[in-house]
Amino acid sequence: MYQDYIIIDGLQYSHWDRDYFKMLQASGVNAVHATLVYHEDARQTLTRFAEWNARFEQNSDLILPVYSVADIKTAKQKGKVGIFFGAQNCSPIDNEIGLISVMRRLGLLIMQLTYNNQSLLATGCYEQNDSGVTRFGQQAIAEMNRVGMIIDMSHSAEQSTLEAIEISSRPICISHANPTTAHEALRNKSDTVISALTKAGGLLGFSLYPFHLPNGSACTLNDFCSMIANCADKYGVEHLAIGSDLCINQPQAVLEWMRNGRWSKAMDYGEGNANNSGWPDTLPWFAGKDGMENIYNGLLQHGFNETDAGKIIGQNWFDFLESGIKPLA
């Protein structure tokens, strides 16, 4: 049954208030990968950690911080939701490789090398020219491998992603994206990338952000589970998970910060456009407390057995974290 499994959502950036934590608790989700920063520098990242420390203090009956997978087990046992942190950009390390270990010690378990644009480490998926992983990026990957910080290439361009997979001595993740065979989008990933990722032991988290889905906000549970089933046939169940990219109750200003940061005076609409500049409509079958359970049941209806469905809704993330966040001896 659904509640028998460890349930993990591999990416969210919702409005983190007490009501939302209550909803997560009621959903049965045991842990969530929460985006800590998008464009914040090192100093601003410290403030984001401080804000989360206050949330943990004020909502200790509902949530707890995750520094190891043992904390996820504790969250499940106590009926709480574990929160583990990732950065959707490399901005928290400024241009200083030594800050990778500092951020890891503070609890940053995952970091993307890019967020759509060219960074000091690699090329983002919205750039016209993909120059691959930079010299700094090669050193950063090695340091992330050493300290047990997982590399995430969700917003990176194809060549950069393929190079990161090859350069990294440890499996990497694409925490929230879908195959381009299901929906053509700059943020989605080709069969070439997903094949290389999974052959190297990496993990793909399927996104529920409408711009990444077949039929957008009209994507059905059947559509979504069919996409997962197709990938399971190609790449194996053990490499598949959920990274919903859920952004519930966030204001327009947050969307504009995500898209524009400090890099553009002109409005960048990301995957939208001037006539469709707001948040896309959330999928009705996923937005509430039954979302992950709906996916679990949908997978069963698509022929997955309970064990494999349980892997996709959480166990694969748990296993990936268990090995990936251990520092190298």
Image: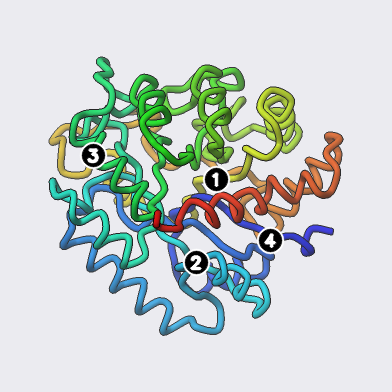
Which labelled disc corresponds to residue 139? 3
The reply to whether dot 1 and dot 2 touch (C-beta < 8 Å) is: no
Nearer mark to the viewer, of 1 and 2? 2
The reply to whether dot 2 and dot 3 touch (C-beta < 8 Å) is: no
Question: Which residue is identified by label 1?
Answer: 243
Nearer mark to the viewer, of 3 and 4? 3
The reply to whether dot 1 and dot 4 touch (C-beta < 8 Å) is: no
Q: CA distance from mark 4 to mark 2?
A: 14 Å
- Mark 3 or 4, nearer chain start: 4
How is this picture coloured?
A: rainbow
Residue 59: give x, y in percent of width and height.
48, 81
Q: Give left or right: position of 292 versus 191.
A: right
Q: CA distance from mark 3 to mark 4?
A: 34 Å
Which labelled disc corresponds to residue 297? none
Indicate the amino acid at tag 4: Ile
Local packing at callout 3 (Cα closer than 10 Å; few below 14, some 14-19, many 20+) is some
Indicate the amino acid at tag 3: Gln
Residue 275 at least partly seen: no
Question: Which residue is identified by label 2?
Answer: 68
Residue 58 at least partly seen: yes
Question: Which residue is identified by label 4?
Answer: 6
Q: Secondary structure at mark 3?
A: helix
- Mark 4 or 2, nearer chain start: 4
Q: Give left or right: position of 293 versus 272.
A: right
Local packing at callout 1 (Cα closer than 10 Å; few below 14, some 14-19, many 20+) is many
